[in-house]
Amino acid sequence: MYVSITGLRLNGPLHAARFWWHALRSMAQAQSAAGNLRAEARAINGVQHTLTVWTDRAAMRRFMVSGAHAKAMRAFPAIATGSTFGYESDGVPDWSAVHALWQERGVAYGAKGAKPAA
């Protein structure tokens, strides 16, 4: 299976409504997407995190570039900063592991050469 972890920090409180508009639609899309095994979100230390688990990387990529999530990605630079980390796994990490992996291995979204959730 493929695990994808994101963490986003709003560029400021004025962006909250727009962030949540995109976040709620993207989460609903993820939860109903083909190949999705789990989709959860949690705020940790002011950072909005998501954990999604997929049957494989291809299923995650199909979700990532379509629908509400694709629209959210286009809006992202004006709303928040963040990083992602994705990897193949035989198990689902708990939230303490999710946060540690994101802190240690997350790649800044939009960083030169970065691939979202790669």
Image: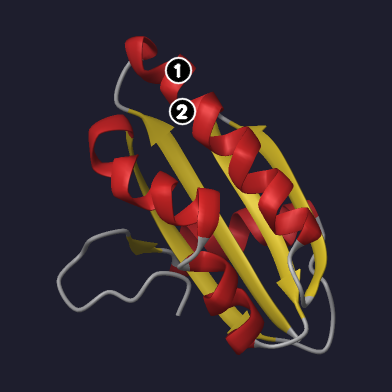
Q: Where's residue 105, x and y in %?
A: 45, 70
**Label 2 residue SS:** helix
Of residue 48 and residue 27, the one placed in the foreground of this image is 27
**Residue 46, can we see it?**
no
Location of residue 93 with respect to 39 vertically, above or below:
below
Judging by the rendered image, the residue that carries numbered circle 1 is 16
Location of residue 114 with respect to 103 vertically, above or below:
below
Residue located 83% across and 72% down the image: 92
Q: Where's residue 8, x and y in %?
A: 45, 41
User: Quarter holding the C terminus?
Assistant: bottom left
Q: Residues within 10 Å of mark 2 (few under 14, many from 20)?
A: many
Q: Residues within 10 Å of mark 1 (few under 14, many from 20)?
A: few
> Which quarter of the figure has residue 106?
bottom left
Q: Where's residue 77, x and y in %?
A: 24, 42
Location of residue 103 with respect to 104 vertically, above or below:
above
Q: How is the image coloured?
A: secondary structure
> What amino acid type should be assigned to the residue bearing mark 1?
Ala
Of residue 60 and residue 91, the one placed in the foreground of this image is 60
> Which quarter of the figure has residue 45?
top right
User: Quarter holding the N terminus?
Assistant: bottom right
Q: Is residue 74 left or right of residue 1?
A: left
Of residue 91 and residue 13, the one placed in the foreground of this image is 13
Residue located 45% across and 17% down the image: 16
Judging by the rendered image, the residue that carries numbered circle 2 is 19
Of residue 82 and residue 26, the one placed in the foreground of this image is 26
Residue located 36% across and 18% down the image: 15
Q: Are marks 1 and 2 in contact (CB under 8 Å)?
A: yes
Distance CA(mark 1)–CA(mark 2):
5 Å
